[in-house]
Image (tube, grey):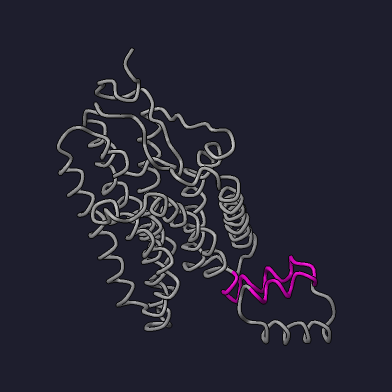
Amino acid sequence: MSDSNTTNFTNPSTFILLGIPGLEAAYVWISIGFCTMYIIAILGNFIILFIVRTEPSLHGPMYYFLCMLAVTDLVLTTSTLPKLLSIFWFNSREIEFSACLTQLFFVHCFSGIESGILVAMALDRYVAICDPLRHSSILTNLVVAKIGLAVVLRSVILVLPYPFLARQWPYCRTNVIPHTHCEHMAVVKLSCADIRISNYYGLFALSFRVGLDLFFITVSYIQILRAIFTFYIPGLFSSLSYRLGHNVPLHFHILLANVYLLVPPMLNPIIYGVRTKQIRDRLLRLLPHNGIQLLSWFSGSQTELHAQLAGDMVQGPLP
């Protein structure tokens, strides 16, 4: 009876996700860290959506882009973390072939959407700083909607070939993926065919998206690079290490790939939300006074918050 992992097949019915080979003994501790980051990402992004939705003064281009970023982060983390945790906690490693390609598409597509939204946010700041008197007339709600649609369409068009190319390759070696989710190169490298088309196209899509987006962000708003490096550096390393980093330990690559998908959604509500004065002021009204110190630590504006609290003591309680 032949081993099911080496049986010849064109399209396997299922793939087996190994998780993080070599770190099985630490799954409980790793899962606690990832689960904590996931919870913070979910809560943080839902809070951003709630505050922008309920505060009329925040109904503007920058905050619409911030909501787009929050939705993108929610989808990006939810497309990978539940399956990762099921592997760590319940040893549920199987994933159907079609579900694997769907996950592959969502991971790469929404990573591209997030990158495009960062460009849109930088564009908004560029207009606000360089042409403030025409900001509201340039970035109207219709323009914001068109920019959002363009960001989504660009990412969909760039990523759509990934699953289509992956589906056509014959998988006659193994159906075991040494990863926690269906990452593009982790899947196509299992093929026994010549996958240079997938490899070259993946490099083109990565270079086009990251290179172009970084260029526009640098030109429009160079100071925002401090925040977005959290997003780009792990992703670039994760993608290029599959192609060039033959000496990189597999478990390090898989950990970095998951950090790349978790850390930006966890930090974005803090970087773009709590540190934004209007959102911070609104959040202060929702928090009890014993939560003020925690918020000031996140926002890096402790002096400003103390001044605001002093004013509140004079004016009376917040409504």
Q: Magenta-highlighted stretch: main secondary structure?
A: helix
Q: Is residue 296 left or right of residue 101?
A: right
Residue 299 sits in which quadrant? bottom right
Judge by depth and name the residue closer to the eye, 94 or 29.
29
Query: Magenta region: which residues?
Result: 274-297
**Magenta stretch holds residue 235:** no
| Figure check: 254 above or below 130 | above
| Figure check: 99 above or below 44 | above
Residue 178 sits in which quadrant? top left
| Figure check: 184 above or below 115 | above
* Quadrant including the C terminus: bottom right
Judge by depth and name the residue closer to the eye, 160 or 199.
199
Judge by depth and name the residue closer to the eye, 80 or 86.
86
**Magenta stretch holds residue 284:** yes
Q: Which residue is pictured at 75% across the width and 69% down the height?
A: 291
Q: Is residue 94 left or right of residue 305?
A: left
Relative image position of residue 219 (x, y in whole percent): 30, 77
Q: Which residue is pictured at 33% across the width and 60% down the height?
A: 237
Question: Among all residues in the image, which is located at the extreme top?
Answer: 1
Q: Which residue is pictured at 35% across the width and 35% down the height?
A: 101
Question: How many discs appear?
Answer: 0
Relative image position of residue 308 (x, y in whole percent): 73, 83
Relative image position of residue 149 (x, y in whole percent): 36, 53
* Quadrant including the N terminus: top left
Q: Which residue is pictured at 63% across the width and 82% down the height?
A: 301
Relative image position of residue 217 (x, y in whole percent): 33, 72
Q: Is residue 169 left or right of residue 24?
A: left
